[in-house]
Amino acid sequence: LLAASCGRSEAVRELLAAGADTKTRNQDGQGVIEIAGLRTPPEEASAREQVLDEVLLAVKSLRTLVIHHAECQHFQAGAVLSSVRESVPAHRLEFSSQFPAATPKAVDAVH
């Protein structure tokens, strides 16, 4: 957690490769994602992004999950999904359409 909070992406990469526990929390309940780069000066904001990249490349379960159904491409949501895929680095997201089918009424309600 200390390496992550200090924005030390190389140290974070090495610790993850050595099997560091990414579920560890500090006394406030914050994990590596929440504290990444918090102790770096504002002018070094890229350090936070570098730490996040290292963690998210290594730990798939910490990525943001975007769920959608196969029919999304036929609705306006298809454009939203495309926009998300273009604007957010792929290693920060996990897409899935693996869940029970929704009723047509439920699909209409969310689109």
Image: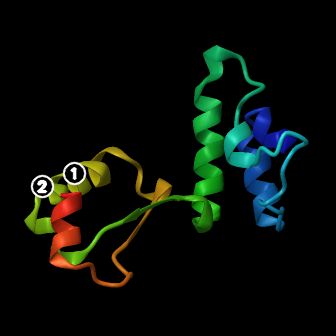
Q: Are marks 2 and 1 in contact (CB under 8 Å)?
A: yes
Residue behind mark 2: 76
In the rendered view, tell whether residue 90 sits above or below residue 88. Answer: below
Question: Residue at position x 78%, y 25% from top?
Answer: 39
In the rendered view, tell whether residue 103 sits above or below residue 66. Answer: below
Query: Residue 21 location in percent, x, y?
Result: 83, 63
Q: Determine the image quadrant of residue 15.
A: bottom right
Question: Residue at position x 65%, y 32% from top?
Answer: 47
Q: Going by the image, does 43 lie left or right of 73? A: right
Q: Going by the image, does 11 lie left or right of 109? A: right
Q: Looking at the image, which is closer to me, 53 or 71?
A: 71
Mark 2 lies on a secondary structure that is helix
Q: Determine the image quadrant of residue 34.
A: top right
Badge number at residue 80 = 1
Tell me if I can see residue 72 in this picture. no
Query: Could you classify mark 1 by the number of other residues whose Cα lies within 10 Å: few (under 14), some (14-19), or many (20 or more)?
Result: few
Question: Residue at position x 54%, y 58% from top?
Answer: 63
Q: Going by the image, does 38 lie left or right of 77? A: right
Tell me if I can see residue 62 in this picture. yes
Q: Looking at the image, which is closer to me, 9 or 60?
A: 60
Number of numbered callouts drawn: 2
Query: Residue 57 location in percent, x, y?
Result: 58, 59
Mark 1 lies on a secondary structure that is helix
**Gap between marks 2 and 1 measured at Cα:** 7 Å
